[in-house]
């Protein structure tokens, strides 16, 4: 049976959640009026967003109707509460009209709403009420779970082989995909044998992870399989490393109706997963907002478009790549004009990028063993400092953001409705949340807690300095599983847009300007494109900061080739003459066909088409040579 999934997609601030709250209000009122509305699950990524939505929904309801709202989730990330039981136990108690922890419980009748997190929803066991339940899934984008990599020695690998079998990963057409990617299948094992494996002390350290994964992949007899695991086995010395990612499998099987709310849903993991599994995915944005927002989609879209025209984006560096956790941890920034000079100095001293990382660690951790520098290291450090490089990227970005934000705030005052000055908000990775900030300029916010945070809607500066790119192996794995999905772009760009949407641009009653500070010009351009090019990118601050760029040997090499090869390229373009655009078009077509062929190497039609396009491009070069 084909599952139908409806979605409402739009930029942050469009009014998706406000429309969803009106939808929930009508659901409660319909149930109390005796209409056949069934039940409703509201599912969100964070507890903060759940609590905020509950608060806003209650504000629209008569207090007597608040009893129709239930919420079950872990507190402060707790896994188990002895008094109340697990989250799953409490959810089932609600559905079964049972008591939980001594609390009085009203029947979960039609018109009732149960609030829960994404992680709780995906673990739900089958229930009779599901076929009368509508699922309202909010902020639905990142759907894959990066599971911890498993280090397997000979004995733990034997345990892995006992619990699981593997097969080569195949794409949606059934063709094998190169790269060594595997699909994981649980073997049928008697409970008594599983119990005996627990007692093997040689495998106890990895048993928990393997056993939990086995349990997730082997539900009860009457339960659907709601998870699938893919992986990549890599050798690491005498051990093997199993890199893995989990994706939900048919997560909405058995429910009455599915409605997803998301920013730019068509680029998300969830969208591509649903398409891969054969779901019918329908965009109902306009009719849904027309019904549940005052003024409908037209007014909401017009207002948010006007707000995005008030947005200025300032990139701190000239880097075209997305911000990288690896770079924050080990990298350095250097003026664009010094890239080639550093590359030449490295060649002179016979040094690699790994040596630069050693220098960075030594400067950042002078009291550790990593702080010992050789004579050659010190010579390179002198060159780096002479080139005005920055060895602590996050420290430099935070200080630069303060400088830019102060200048902006001096021109454009930010106050709340009572005239109280409002600081900006800086979005960072969790390890930097406690970094000392000038509180009158910025408050910090963990990037993992961005969704649904509306307390910054009067702030006119948002700095997004987080790096959340997936590990390279995970990115390759996701791109293999979901061929049309761009893991690198989706991870960072969507979270950046969500973060920027916390500021005053989401305030429909404001006409004030807003500044967004991001780490790279590549990210700024992606954000601008996702916002239909309404915001403007300002590079004057980037120039004043020194036109900095992350150190990359490839970038330096490109600079060298650019300087030496520009004349040859000009001559080649002149030879092509009127065929230049055609040559470029054929090159792009070749690139696309090669990507498709990599996913399906045995497709003879693709092979033939690729050969014809390559031949056509080659003929252009022959004619003009």
Image (spheres, rainbow, N blue to C red):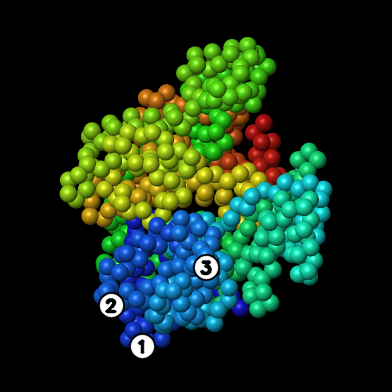
Q: Residues within 10 Å of mark 2 (few under 14, many from 20)?
A: few
- Label 1: which residue? 34
**Image disc number at residue 85:** 3
Earlier residue among tags 1 and 2:
1
430 versus 129 height, above or below: above
- Label 2: which residue? 64
Q: Going 58% across and 13% down the picture, which residue do you hit?
A: 378
Which residue is outermost to the bottom?
34
Q: Going 55% across and 16% down the picture, which residue do you hit?
A: 381
Q: Going 41% across and 51% down the picture, which residue do you hit?
A: 450
Residue 171, how many percent across, how many down? 69, 60
Q: Is residue 464 left or right of residue 596?
A: left
Which residue is outermost to the left?
418
Observer able to see residue 152: yes
Number of numbered discs overlaid on the protein picture = 3
- Disc number lying in front (1 or 3): 3
């Amino acid at each position: 049976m084909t599952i139908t999934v409806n979605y409402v997609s739009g930029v942050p601030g469009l009014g998706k959640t406000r429309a969803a709250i009106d939808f929930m209000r009508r659901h409660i009122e319909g149930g109390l009026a005796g209409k056949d509305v069934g039940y409703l699950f509201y599912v969100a990524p964070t507890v903060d967003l759940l609590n905020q939505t509950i608060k806003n929904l209650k504000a629209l309801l008569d207090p007597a109707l608040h009893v129709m709202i239930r919420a079950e989730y872990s507190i402060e990330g707790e896994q188990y509460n002895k008094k109340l039981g697990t989250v799953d136990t409490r959810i089932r108690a609600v559905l079964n009209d049972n008591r939980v922890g001594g609390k009085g419980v009203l029947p979960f009748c039609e018109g009732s709403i149960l609030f829960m997190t994404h992680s709780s929803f995906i673990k739900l066991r089958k229930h009779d009420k599901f076929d009368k339940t509508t699922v309202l899934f909010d902020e639905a984008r990142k759907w894959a779970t990066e599971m911890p990599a498993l280090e397997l020695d000979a004995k733990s690998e034997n345990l892995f082989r006992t619990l699981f079998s593997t097969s080569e990963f195949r794409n949606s057409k059934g063709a094998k995909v190169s790269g060594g990617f595997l699909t994981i299948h649980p073997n049928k094992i008697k409970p008594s044998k599983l119990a005996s494996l627990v007692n093997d002390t040689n495998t106890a350290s990895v048993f928990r992870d393997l056993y939990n994964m086995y349990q997730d992949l082997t539900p009860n007899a009457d339960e659907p399989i709601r998870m699938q695991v893919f992986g990549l086995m890599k050798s690491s010395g005498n051990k093997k490393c199993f890199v893995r990612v989990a994706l939900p499998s048919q997560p909405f099987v058995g429910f009455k109706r599915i409605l997803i709310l998301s920013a730019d849903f068509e680029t998300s993991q969830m969208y591509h997963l649903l398409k891969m599994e054969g779901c019918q995915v329908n965009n109902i944005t306009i009719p849904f907002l027309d019904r549940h927002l005052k003024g409908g989609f037209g007014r909401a879209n017009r207002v948010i478009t006007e707000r995005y025209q008030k947005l200025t984006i300032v990139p701190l560096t000239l880097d075209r790549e997305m911000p990288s956790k690896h770079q924050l941890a080990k990298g350095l920034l250097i003026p664009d004009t010094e890239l080639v000079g550093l590359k030449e100095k490295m060649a002179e001293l016979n040094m690699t990028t790994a040596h630069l990382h050693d220098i960075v660690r030594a400067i950042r951790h002078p009291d550790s063993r990593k702080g010992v520098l050789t004579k050659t290291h010190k010579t390179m450090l002198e060159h780096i400092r002479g080139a005005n490089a920055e060895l602590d990227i996050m420290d430099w970005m935070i200080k630069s953001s303060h400088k830019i934000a102060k200048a902006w705030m001096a021109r454009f005052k930010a106050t709340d409705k009572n005239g109280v000055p409002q600081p900006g908000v800086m979005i960072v990775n969790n390890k930097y949340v406690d970094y000392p900030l000038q509180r009158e300029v910025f408050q910090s916010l963990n990037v993992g807690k961005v969704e649904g945070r509306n307390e910054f809607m009067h702030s006119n500066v948002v700095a997004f300095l987080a790096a959340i790119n997936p590990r390279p192996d995970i990115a390759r794995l996701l791109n293999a599983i979901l061929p049309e999905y761009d893991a690198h772009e989706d991870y960072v760009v969507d979270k950046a847009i969500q973060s920027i949407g916390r500021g005053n641009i989401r305030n429909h009653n404001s006409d004030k300007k807003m500044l967004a500070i991001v780490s790279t010009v590549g990210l700024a351009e992606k954000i601008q494109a996702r916002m239909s090019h309404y915001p403007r990118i300002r590079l004057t601050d980037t120039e004043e900061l020194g036109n900095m760029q992350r150190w990359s040997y490839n970038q330096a090499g490109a600079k060298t080739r650019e300087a030496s090869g520009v004349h040859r390229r000009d001559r080649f373009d002149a030879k092509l003459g009127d065929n230049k655009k055609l040559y470029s078009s054929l090159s792009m077509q070749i690139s696309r066909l090669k990507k498709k062929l990599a996913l399906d190497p045995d497709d003879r039609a693709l092979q033939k088409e690729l050969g014809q396009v390559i031949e056509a491009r080659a003929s252009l070069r022959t004619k003009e040579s």
